[in-house]
């Protein structure tokens, strides 16, 4: 998928909006559009990536990925073979907290696609999202889940490639 037509459309719209301001404003809009192109391209790629993540959560037998090839983004759909092993069963629920135990409120931010996925799983199990999240956190904590990395720690995930502005 070539993103250039979308960026050209944005550039054309900016030029049309600047035209009534005269030649100086038009020139400033042209310079601005060239400066903003890398950011706009990145924003389009992020939108494509978010869309593929959401689509993947809604497909039972396929995954969707964005692959970058030069300045183009390719959308790749991969079918999941039926003979792949099923995901592991959910761990047993942890013991209930003692009655009268203190409760704390926590605000959790997550991608919309993940939220939808969690809601679907909780509904399938017949429990609330809150109960499902409490159970998942308790299970992770009781299984010795790794702590957050110390400040300044670099992730093992790497992004490689090049960018040309």
Image (cartoon, grey):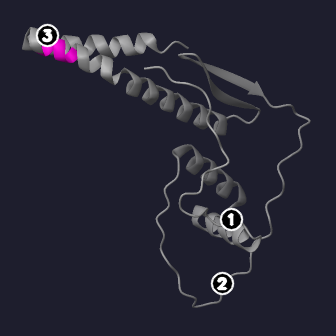
Residue on which the image places disc 1: 136
Spatial CA span between label 1 and label 2: 14 Å
Residue on which the image places disc 2: 97
In this rendering, the answer to whether 50 lies above or below 149 is above
Point out residue 15 in the picture as x, y percentages from the top left corner.
Answer: 22, 12
Residue at 68 percent of width and 69 percent of height: 135
Q: Which of disc 2 and disc 1 is earlier in sequence?
A: 2
86 or 67: which is nearer to us? 67
56 or 146: which is nearer to us? 146
Point out residue 79 in the picture as x, y percentages from the top left corner.
Answer: 78, 27
Q: Nearer the viewer, mark 2 or mark 3?
A: 3
Look at the numbered disc 1 and give the secondary structure of its residue.
helix
Q: Residues within 10 Å of mark 1 (few under 14, many from 20)?
A: some
Q: Which mark is residue 69?
A: none
Residue 28 highlighted magenta (yes or no)? yes
Q: Residue 93 is drawn in which quadrant?
A: bottom right
Q: Residue 11 is drawn in which quadrant?
A: top left
Residue on which the image places disc 3: 19
Q: Residues within 10 Å of mark 3 (few under 14, many from 20)?
A: some
Look at the numbered disc 2 and give the secondary structure of its residue.
loop
Residue at 77 percent of width and 70 percent of height: 143
Q: Residues within 10 Å of mark 2 (few under 14, many from 20)?
A: few
Q: Which residues are magenta?
A: 25-29
Q: Nearer the viewer, mark 1 or mark 3?
A: 3
Spatial CA span between label 2 and label 3: 66 Å
């Amino acid at each position: 998928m070539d993103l250039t037509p979308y960026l050209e459309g944005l550039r054309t719209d900016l030029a049309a909006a600047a035209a009534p301001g005269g030649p100086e404003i038009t020139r400033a809009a042209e310079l601005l559009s060239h400066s903003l192109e890398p950011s706009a391209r990145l924003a389009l790629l992020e939108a494509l990536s978010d869309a593929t993540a959401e689509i993947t959560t809604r497909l039972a037998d396929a995954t969707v990925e964005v692959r970058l090839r030069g300045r183009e983004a390719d959308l790749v759909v991969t079918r999941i073979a039926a003979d792949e092993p099923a995901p592991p069963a959910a761990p047993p629920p942890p013991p209930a907290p003692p009655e009268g135990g203190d409760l704390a409120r926590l605000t959790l931010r997550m991608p919309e696609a993940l939220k939808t996925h969690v809601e679907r799983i909780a509904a399938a199990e017949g429990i609330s999202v809150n109960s499902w999240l409490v159970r998942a956190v308790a299970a992770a904590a009781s299984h010795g889940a790794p702590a957050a990395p110390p400040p300044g720690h670099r992730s093992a995930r790497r992004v490689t490639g090049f960018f040309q502005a």
